[in-house]
Image: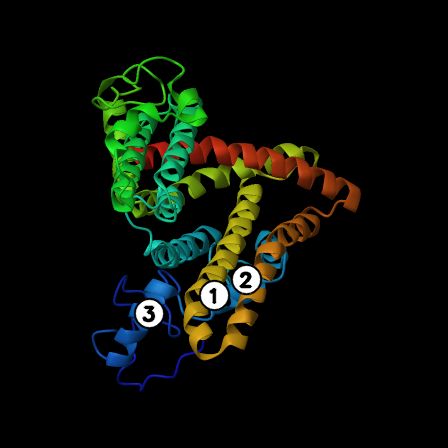
Amino acid sequence: MSRPSLPADELPRSCENCGTLLQGHYCHACGQSTHSPVRHVGHAVEEVFESFWHLDGRIFRTVRDLFVPGRIANRYLDGQRVRYVAPMRLLVILTLLTFFVAKFVIQDAMQDVGPGQLRTDRVAVELDHARSADEVRRLRGEALAGIADTRRTVGAWPGASPQLDVAEAEVRAHAESRIAELGAEGAAAAEGNAETPAEGRAAAAGPASDAPGIRTGAPAPPTIGGPIGERIERNVVRLGDEPQLFVRAVLGVAPTALFILVPLFAVLLKLLYLFQRRLYLEHVVVGLYSHAALMLGLLLVFCGALAAPWLAARAPWAAGTVHVVQTALLWAMPVYLLLMQKRVYGQSWPRTLLKFAVLGLLYFALFLSVAIPMAGYALYAL
């Protein structure tokens, strides 16, 4: 970028950093500029922004060319590197911005989710609309039978049993409260005698204290032994009251998972294009720019999600347009990656489509192998 000329009396004759005689506005030995941030306020402000954002034109040029599949990767690999932000730096910037905005989007989406809404809200609404004590007992029996079935299916998962115990207690308490409201005479006596078929199925395994679906005693012991299992179960119980905690924890570890996936993605590219004799680091560059493009697309989608409520209240037509753009961006992501793969590696369409499908399946497996342990760690670290 060209800089305005300094007056002759302000232009140093030798580099203040290494002492080399100057022949322009930059030292040819160490690269330091003749502009001093301690002598001019404008130079100080310029240095702050240039150091943090590198706003010398490269960031805008990089983002612009990133919208064209394969252009920036091909040019960078061809040696045109000075005009673009380095791929790792670009991915870091876009990733941090994307997950920063995502936290606000998730927070807005979950701000109305309160304690208990994830467990028994639907049952509570049905009980509130019941018109007789018999109907309340029928709904209660169906709900308890469903909890029993769920316990047999996922009861061994860490934290599942305490959650089901809480849900069961809430159903029972809400049913008894509704029966009292209806003013049914002899509700206490009828409670023990009027057993519905659904309740009979729930109690078929034996006494209430021993049945897998009905537990009235203390919470079940941890399903994973040791302090790790106990901590995970306690955190799972906390999620019933504060579901946002897990989302925030996952968003906190997601960037780490992303940076683990990039070199693994490059390994897959290396194997699929082994006979092109490209260096592994070339595939890393392709992986970095691929993920940077995905982060840019997600960033735009999240920004649209933040703007949609504001637009819906003031310009409904604009909110609809934003929704269409968001949908188009999400559908465009796999198409972008396919075109990028075709233009960078230059193979025929049949080969590219085949390798793209294989790459997608293998990458999805890698994603699960990284995301699941990260989610477990997030649950443990709450």
Mark 1 neighbour density, 10 Å: few (under 14) some (14–19) many (20 or more):
some
Which residue was labeled with disc 1? 304
Name the kind of residue labelled 3 in the image. Phe
Q: Residue at x 54, y 47 (%)?
A: 285
Q: CA distance from mark 1 to mark 2?
A: 7 Å
* Residue 72, picture quadrant: bottom right
Name the kind of residue labelled 1 in the image. Gly
Q: Position of residue 313 (x, y in %)?
A: 43, 75
Residue 8 vs 318, above or below: the answer is below
Q: CA distance from mark 3 to mark 2?
A: 31 Å
User: What is the number of the mark on residue 363?
Assistant: none
Earlier along the polypeptide chain: callout 1 or callout 2?
Answer: 1
Nearer to me, 215 or 290: 215
Mark 3 neighbour density, 10 Å: few (under 14) some (14–19) many (20 or more):
few
Name the kind of residue labelled 2 in the image. Gln
Q: Position of residue 39 (x, y in %)?
A: 21, 78
Q: What secondary structure is found at the residue carrying circle 2?
A: helix
Q: CA distance from mark 3 to mark 1?
A: 27 Å
Which residue was labeled with disc 3? 49
Nearer to me, 272 or 195: 195
Earlier along the polypeptide chain: callout 3 or callout 1?
Answer: 3
Dot 1 and dot 2 residues touching (CB under 8 Å) = yes
* Residue 193, picture quadrant: top left
